[in-house]
Image (cartoon, rainbow, N blue to C red):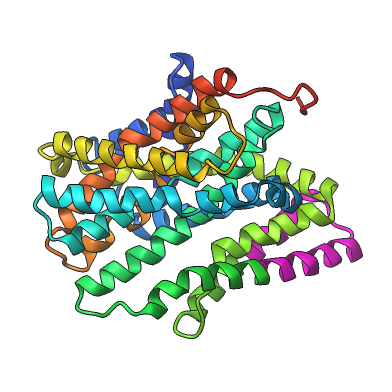
Amino acid sequence: MLTNVGLIMIAGLIGSKIFSKIKLAPILGMLLAGIIISPNLLGLVKGDIGALSKDLRQIALVVILSRAGLSLSFDRLREVGLPAILMTFLPASFEMVAITFLANKIFNLPYIDSAILGAVLAAVSPAIVVPRMIRLIEEGYGEDKKIPEIILAGSSIDDVYTIVFFTVFINLKLGGQASIGSFLNIPISIITGILFGIILGYILDIIYAKISLGKIYKAIALMGLSFFILEIEDLAKGYIAFSGLVAIIAMTMTIKKLDQDLADELLGVYGSLWELFEIFLFVLVGITVDLSIIGEEILPALLLITGGLIFRMLGVYLALLPSNLEKSEKIFSGFAYLPKATVQAAIGPVALGYGIASGKLILAISVIAILYTAPLGAILTDKTYKKLLAQNKKAKL
């Protein structure tokens, strides 16, 4: 197991540095490194890494969302208002509906299978979006109109929204029933997550004030509590809808509201942690790629995914209509909302695991979506933000 961890770290680092040198997105190098060392190519990674992969992805997600929360301000989100709320569900809804109909026509899938695929593909990747929006905040791009905050908030909740729909559709496919309560779980899980996270944020701030701890120990305490929150989510199933991911965001946002200096300290630590877990996350995605199952589906899959992205960008445009954003700023927001990786890697294999006939195809398209949209979204965001967004000259450098 340790050999696998070492291989992942070294291969990811080498891939990242090579692609940085040739002016391409480092995550492309990490993804390629994972494909090369995977059992499907060189076979350097040995044994079953499923459990390790799941745990490392979960840790990476905690780091990502904690960074998002520590960068978001309740007051600034309140000023943005409706556009931030619409961005949490409107783009994903447009893409989900589009994929459902397109997959039925292109692959002749039953509508319920197409809906499962739509829910898998509709989630944006916080692993790609969050670090880039934090960089924009630090450099001051789009800050006057709070564009990074709108995208940060939307992308953080977007995943919760799509995963709930995915669960409902899987249940329907397996012979269950969809009730009004199933769909009510979406707002309930968000509300309970926000309330619980705010309470924990206040408690943690009091503890930090009472006990003298260095910033590393404060970050360790915060991360440990975040893991407990995710465990509470599992324990709460069947009793009350609760989103641990939303709770983590709300908790860290509360810390920022109560103590900006503390939030800055924690952001520094979590920024360093992300440099490590970014490698794990994207190399592990590459390792999951089975080249044998995606070859024959790649062209129709690209057509399907591109169609979904077009409708997603339409959803972004409509979500931002109540804002004062210029056309160029709306286009940038659409670019920033394109990438997929984390959720697709996590739930893409689920249908196959349940023995659903279309599971192999759903997994193949999920992998193609990652390889296509993760670098596409990252490159478009990185290459256009200085051209499409105005810079606040007073930003931190």
Pick the front one: 319 or 348: 319
Which residue occupies the extreme bottom position in the image?
Answer: 239
Pick the front one: 383 or 274: 383
Q: Which residues are magenta?
A: 197-226
In the displayed structure, would residue 53 be above or below residue 237? above
Pick the front one: 364 or 43: 364
Classified by dominant secondary structure, the portion drawn in magenta counts as helix
Question: Residue 186 placed where, x, y %?
Answer: 47, 68
Which residue: 48% across, 23% down? Answer: 17
Quadrant holding the C terminus:
top right
Left or right: residue 359 versus residue 62 is left
Reply yes or no: does residue 18 show up in magenta.
no
Which residue: 20% across, 71% down? Answer: 173
Question: Residue 23 placed where, x, y %?
Answer: 46, 15
Question: Residue 188 placed where, x, y %?
Answer: 53, 73
Reply yes or no: does residue 223 show up in magenta.
yes
Left or right: residue 154 versus residue 199 is left
* Quarter where residue 255 is shown: bottom right
Question: Can residue 44 be seen by looking at this rendering?
Answer: no
In the displayed structure, would residue 397 be above or below residue 259? above
Number of marks in the image?
Answer: 0
Left or right: residue 127 versus residue 180 is right
